[in-house]
């Protein structure tokens, strides 16, 4: 393809979709597509969708209404193709074209490497649908990003190391839309991290639907654990910070817990979804851990890394959840003292066991419980943020702030930190003393400027807010 065309990609949902969207853009770049931030200029519009909750899936149809109008408006001058990718595409397939006939192309997460071929088919036949689970290694066929694309995306990058899930929590569509657990080989992941680091990436988050179930083939021909992969990633020149997400409590093995003690580049922050504080509900959710298992895991993690801050996911109003079950969730939040959490109303998803369970909870009850839970979580988060006042952290600066002369970066705990700093520090780590706390970010002043010798741990650690 000689002539350049414009590509607009919009991601919904999780970081895995953000990563996938970038890999699709990288693959299409070698076919003459240049990314645009303006959907109205695009020749190809890709909506990379999320099916996790009903609201997320419905957003796609309202966005399709908007892009259909753009396609019609452009029709006199050029042909605009509309593609639906991601988990809604995987779950609904042809149905999307029946509901939204302006769509030309529907393809699931396992077909991204076939995108150039699917596009050619859609251009030729008017339509293409591909929701097969790939038998070949998708990642081996996706084009790598150019150095310019990496630089434009900033100093923090996601790298998918694992996809799919075999856990089958009864509320969740992921095992159906993303398929069985699959881990990428170590060498291909390390080659990608090396490429990112050479172009200026300093922080890498290894991602997967169930990232700590990682068991990819190592260069020694044996499966490697996530802990071993993290250790290897930490010695890639230029990489200063490591994170991983999202983990399942069941797969939090001793070796990975020890990595929080032993790997100085592994940031002292862990997202560890628990979903509920009630054993009865955890069993109905098929979570394969109890409240006591979770609490003991938290204790072991904090023993390994006393500075560790924990965040989590919660679902309220799962079928059969009583007021006592919900109270157990509230008490778990208080007992663990999370530094933040996401909380959701249970959304029955077609094809999952939860959707068929009797005792579905009334929407009004779900809403009221969600409000109470969010209040409790917000209080914990505020307490955690207050505990940061006066402390000095290493901050990785990512971009200019709202006011001139200001930069925004992230603390080791992922909190956004604003500080007056020279633009030359973008992409670098510097020590910042926290002087002010706002609801969603911290403000600070530079304590020392320039690349540091080795420190990636917070210059001074923060005690995790626990108790009242
Ligand atoms: N793999 C992760 C784990 O084991 O917890 C979570 C993956 S899921 C993409 C992210 C979060 O969405 C879940 O932790 C859960 O809280 C929420 N979620 C998933 N299905 C849901 C549903 N049917 N209704 C409401 N929230 C849901
Ligand atoms: Fe979904 Fe996570 Fe449960 Fe897998 S472990 S089914 S991704 S919630």
Image (spheres, rainbow, N blue to C red):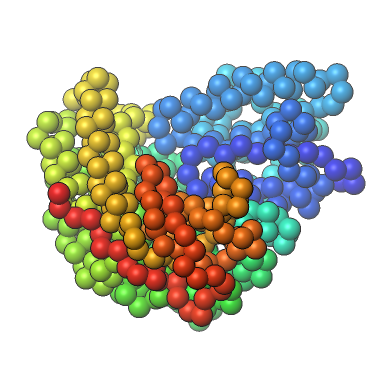
Q: Residue at x 30, y 63 (%)?
A: 462
In this picture, residue 419 sits left or right of residue 129 = left
Image vertical order of residue 395 relative to residue 68, above or below: below
| Picture coordinates of residue 79, whole percent (x, y) | 81, 27
Q: Nearer the viewer, residue 45 or 396?
A: 396
Q: Residue at x 15, y 49 (%)?
A: 468
| Picture coordinates of residue 137, whole percent (x, y) | 59, 59
Examine the rendering and report whether any part of residue 61 can be seen: yes
Rendered image quadrant of residue 351: top left
| Picture coordinates of residue 82, whole percent (x, y) | 69, 30
| Picture coordinates of residue 367, whole percent (x, y) | 27, 25
Examine the rendering and report whether any part of residue 223 can be seen: no
In this picture, residue 135 sits left or right of residue 381 = right
In this picture, residue 350 sits left or right of residue 203 = left
Q: Residue at x 51, y 26 (%)?
A: 59
Residue found farthest to the right: 2
Q: Nearer the viewer, residue 363 or 213?
A: 363
In this picture, residue 457 sits left or right of residue 278 = right
Q: Residue at x 57, y 66 (%)?
A: 428
Residue found farthest to the left: 324
Count of all numbered marks drawn on residues in the image: 0
Image vertical order of residue 156 relative to residue 216, above or below: above
């Amino acid at each position: 393809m000689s002539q350049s065309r414009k590509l607009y990609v919009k991601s919904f949902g999780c970081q895995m979709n953000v990563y996938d969207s970038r890999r699709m853009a990288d693959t299409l770049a070698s076919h003459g597509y240049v990314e645009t931030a303006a959907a109205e200029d695009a020749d190809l519009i890709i909506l990379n969708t999320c099916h996790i909750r009903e609201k997320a899936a419905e957003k796609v149809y309202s966005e399709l209404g908007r892009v259909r109008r753009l396609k019609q408006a452009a029709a006199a001058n050029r042909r605009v193709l509309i593609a639906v990718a991601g988990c809604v595409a995987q779950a609904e397939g042809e149905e999307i074209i029946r509901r939204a006939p302006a769509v030309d192309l529907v393809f699931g997460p396992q077909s991204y490497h076939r995108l150039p071929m699917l596009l050619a088919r859609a251009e030729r036949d008017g339509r293409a649908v591909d929701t097969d689970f790939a038998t070949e290694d998708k990642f081996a066929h996706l084009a790598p990003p150019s150095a310019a694309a990496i630089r434009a995306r900033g100093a923090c990058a996601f790298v998918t190391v694992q996809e799919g899930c075999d856990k089958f929590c009864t509320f969740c569509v992921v095992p159906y839309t993303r398929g069985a657990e699959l881990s990428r080989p170590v060498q291909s992941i390390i080659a990608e991290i090396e490429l990112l680091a050479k172009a200026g990436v300093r922080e890498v988050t290894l991602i997967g639907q169930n990232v700590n179930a990682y068991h990819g083939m190592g260069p020694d021909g044996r499966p490697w654990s996530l802990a071993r992969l993290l250790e290897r990633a930490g010695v890639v020149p230029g990489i200063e910070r490591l994170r991983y997400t999202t983990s399942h409590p069941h797969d939090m093995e001793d070796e990975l817990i020890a990595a929080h003690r032993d790997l100085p580049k592994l940031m002292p922050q862990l997202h560890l979804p628990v979903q509920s504080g009630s054993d009865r509900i955890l069993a109905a959710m098929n979570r394969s851990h109890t409240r006591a298992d979770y609490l003991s895991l938290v204790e072991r993690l904090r023993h390994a890394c006393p500075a560790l801050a924990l965040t989590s996911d919660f679902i309220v109003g799962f079928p059969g959840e009583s007021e006592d079950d919900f109270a157990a969730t509230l008490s778990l939040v208080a007992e663990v003292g999370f530094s933040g959490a996401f909380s959701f109303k249970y959304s029955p998803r077609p094809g999952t066991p939860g959707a068929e369970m009797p005792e579905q909870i009334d929407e009004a009850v779900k809403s009221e419980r969600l409000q109470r839970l969010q209040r409790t979580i917000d209080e914990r988060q505020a307490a955690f943020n207050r505990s940061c006042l006066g402390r000095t952290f290493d901050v990785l600066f990512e971009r200019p702030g709202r006011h001139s002369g200001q930069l925004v970066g992230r603390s080791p705990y992922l909190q956004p930190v604003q500080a007056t700093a020279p633009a030359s520090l973008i992409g670098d780590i510097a020590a910042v003393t926290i002087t002010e706390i706002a609801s969603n970010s911290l403000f600070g002043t530079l304590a020392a400027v320039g690349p540091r010798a080795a420190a990636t741990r917070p210059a001074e650690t923060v005690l995790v807010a626990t108790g009242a």
